[in-house]
Amino acid sequence: MKLSENIQKELNAQLNRELFSAYLYLSMAAYFEKENLKGFAHWFKLQAKEEVSHAMKFFEYIIERNAEVELAQIDKPKKDWAKPLEALKDTYEHEQKVTDYIHKILDLAIKEKDYATQNFLQWFVAEQVEEEAQALEILQKLEKSKDSVGSLFVLDHHLGKRE
Ligand code: FEO
């Protein structure tokens, strides 16, 4: 079964959004490097790589379905944040938006009775639960630390251990 034009368009748009996510997190990594918070920077660099792997899943799936990959321009991400808390707020909000997009594409696949795409997207439905939970955990820790430099350094150390 050939991918419908609509689904092909949406999958390509999501491929682009995943690459934008990588760009956004790389920009955050650069911000944290500048702030000398190496653990946060490490965490966001790994997150950026994970987003590229998400983009590649869309790339491979489009090809597998004998459809066409169309790469659009990637938006320029924000460059600076007033404090780490603001960057984590943006991360959490961004992941919620991504979840919303995944659900919308899944809605379309259900409407069009595209079972293969529904199955493909289920992986992302589960992944987004994890992505949101991870971002929220760090955000809540920062909220609790209430600008304490000590807690920030403890968290930075912890994030630096991400594998
Ligand atoms: Fe690709 Fe962070 O979701």
Image (cartoon, rainbow, N blue to C red):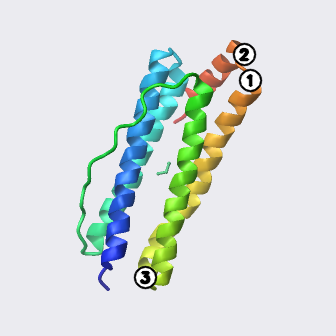
Disc 2 to disc 3, C-alpha distance: 51 Å
**Location of mark 2 (residue):** 148
Q: Are marks 2 and 1 in contact (CB under 8 Å)?
A: yes
- Residue 134 quadrant: top right
- Foreground pick, 8 / 160: 8
Which element carries disc 1, helix, strand or loop? helix
User: Visible in this render: residue 161?
Assistant: no
Question: Which residue occupies 48% across, 33% down?
Answer: 44
Which element carries disc 2, helix, strand or loop? loop
**Location of mark 3 (residue):** 114
Question: Which residue occupies 54% across, 66% down?
Answer: 103
Q: Amino acid at mark 2?
A: Ser
Q: Is residue 130 above or below residue 102?
A: above
User: Visible in this render: residue 89?
Assistant: yes
Q: Earlier in the sequence, mark 2 or mark 3?
A: 3
Q: Position of residue 152 (x, y in %)?
A: 66, 19
Q: Position of residue 83 (x, y in %)?
A: 58, 22
- Mark 2 Cα within 10 Å, few/some/many (few <14, many 20+)? few
Q: Which mark is residue 87?
A: none
- Residue 90 quadrant: top right
Disc 2 to disc 1, C-alpha distance: 5 Å
Question: Which residue occupies 46% across, 85% down?
Answer: 113
**Location of mark 1 (residue):** 145
Disc 3 to disc 1, C-alpha distance: 47 Å
Q: Is residue 51 above or below residue 119?
A: above
2 left or right, relative to 115: left
- Residue 33 quadrant: top left
Question: Which residue occupies 30% across, 76% down?
Answer: 5
Q: Is residue 91 above or below residue 124?
A: above
